[in-house]
Amino acid sequence: MAVLKILTYPDPKLRRKSGPIEKIDGNVEKLLDDITETMYHAPGIGLAAPQVGLNLRVCVIDVSPRDENSEGLIELINPVIISAEGVQMEEEGCLSIPGFVSEVKRKAKVKVQALDRSGKPFEIEGTGLLARAFQHEIDHLDGMLFIDRLSRLKRELLIRKIEKVLGKEQSYAAF
Ligand code: NI
């Protein structure tokens, strides 16, 4: 296992849509182990592969530091939200946008289908913080960040602050 470097905004790898895992082999298992160790080391309650520079549909979640009823580590390969209901509005941050939080509107309850590390499909349901984590991490796999979920005004204000600290997103092609 290894602690990997977490990419931060505005790294373009955070903006790519990640591809599915076609075959679960030792590399995928190592990736799960590494992003888990990196998440705990940060510390954070979720981490997705694109945040360590690998555009693959793999993420891990463990909300137990913030929710004592949590079941602990959840590993997700090729996760898909298959149902969602209700609305919640809570503060949210991201390891790739360190130091910034904002209230983000999310579904209150979601059901996710994914593969486990043995390749077996499973379904898992989450409410509250866990539901939020599922949506946040799956967004990462689609190249989306929580700032994209804000109203235009809130987003523009926050991005201006983020860019002062973390740097500017390039609006032109660089070679
Ligand atoms: Ni994040």
Image (cartoon, rainbow, N blue to C red):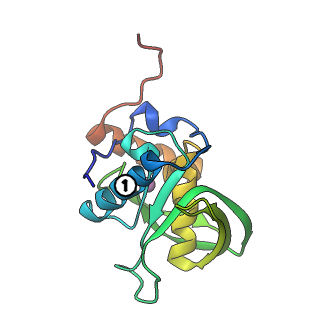
Query: Going 25% across and 52% down the picture, which residue do you hit?
Result: 3
Picture quarter with ligand 1: bottom left
Q: Is residue 66 visible?
A: yes
- In the image, taking residue 2 as reference, residue 64 lies left or right, namely right
Instruction: Return the residue at label 1.
Output: 35
Where disc 1 sits, the SS reads helix
Vertical placement of residue 8 versus 12, above or below: below
Query: Going 54% across and 35% down the picture, which residue do you hit?
Result: 16
Vertical placement of residue 65 versus 52, above or below: below
Which residue is at the front of the view, 133 or 150? 133
Q: Amino acid at mark 1?
A: Ile
Q: Is residue 154 visible?
A: no
Q: Position of residue 94 (x, y in %)?
A: 40, 56
Q: Position of residue 58 (x, y in %)?
A: 51, 52
Q: Position of residue 164 (x, y in %)?
A: 29, 38
Splitting the image into 4 quarters, where does residue 19 fall?
top right
Q: Quadrant of the N terminus?
A: bottom left
Splitting the image into 4 quarters, where does residue 85 fall?
bottom right
Q: Which residue is farthest bottom? A: 69
